[in-house]
Amino acid sequence: MASDLQKSSAMYIEKASPDSIEKGGLKEFDDDGREKRTGTLTTSSAHIITAVIGSGVLSLAWAMAQLGWVAGTVVLIIFSLITWYTSTLLADCYRTPDPVFAQPLYAFIEKWFSHKYPESGFINTEHAVRFPCCGVYNLNWFRLVWRTAFVIVVSVIAMILPFFNAILGLLGALSFWPLTVYFPVEMYIKRVKLPRFSPRWTCLQILAWTCLMVTIVGVVGSVQGVIESLKTYKPFTTTSS
């Protein structure tokens, strides 16, 4: 592992731009050879909160009401442990050449616009804003406007659809297995080169397939809920289920 990290560090240092080297030599690079990361405890905590406490929390109360206090609490604990475990597998892969984004939709849109309009100051300029007791925060106006607009659009859709819980359940079921289980597991297996049918490989595959079955059941149930709700659909009204 150490030798691989040293090789990758040398590779990225060789590919570094002359401007980066002139700014401060190797001090401008992290221990893996990439340009020095600028994340802080505050920014990383904010990303974790926005990634974990997402729109799915809006339907948490409804889900608990359907399952009951006992079953709902047990299921919540089980899947929180699964999410925690797969997040550790994903974190163990963060030194791979390809970056992993906690918010891939935001990252994709912002990267696309940055390449499409490289001369736009509105899109690419970072403005340093100092907050008392919190330090300096880099504000990007495009990122602020586009993310705010996205949240507003999603909120309006939620108000239009009285069965938004079923929609969230469907989206959550579709995204849970590939993003939370499959990709972290496969990335970890590939990084550490686990032998096929070894005990750890077998346990990870059992975990992935079990979560896939749960996902399929969740998708079927959510689709059924959407179909039933469409029969009595009225915009901007609530329906009981």
Image (spheres, helix red, strand yellow):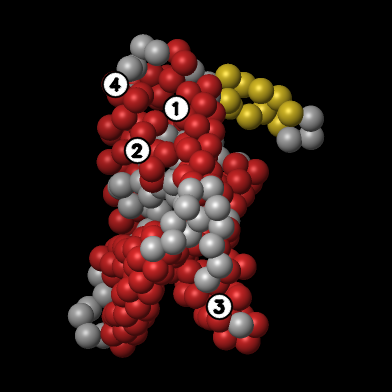
**Amino acid, disc 4:** Lys
Circle 2 crowding by C-alpha within 10 Å: few under 14, some 14–19, many from 20 = few
Quadrant of residue 201 in the image? bottom left
Crowding at label 3, few (<14), some or many (≥20) Cα neighbours within 10 Å? few
- Left or right of 226? Residue 66 is right
Separation of residues labelled 3 and 2 (CA atoms): 36 Å
The residue wearing badge 2 is 108
How far is the residue under mark 3 from the one under mark 4? Answer: 46 Å
SS category of the residue bearing label 1: helix
Task: Judge whether 168 appears above or below 118 on screen.
Answer: below
User: What's the distance in space between the residues labelled 1 and 4, CA to CA?
Assistant: 31 Å
Task: Look at mark 1 in the image and give the residue it sits on.
Answer: 25
- The mark that comes first in sequence, 1 or 4, is 1
Q: Is residue 42 left or right of residue 177?
A: right
Indicate whether 67 appears above or below 107: below
Q: Which mark is residue 116?
A: 4
| Nearest to N terminus: mark 2 or mark 1 | 1
Write down the residue under mark 3: 66
Instruction: Tell me the distance, in whole angstroms, between the alpha carbons under discs 1 and 3.
Output: 59 Å
The image shows residue 135 at horizontal and vertical percentages of 71, 31
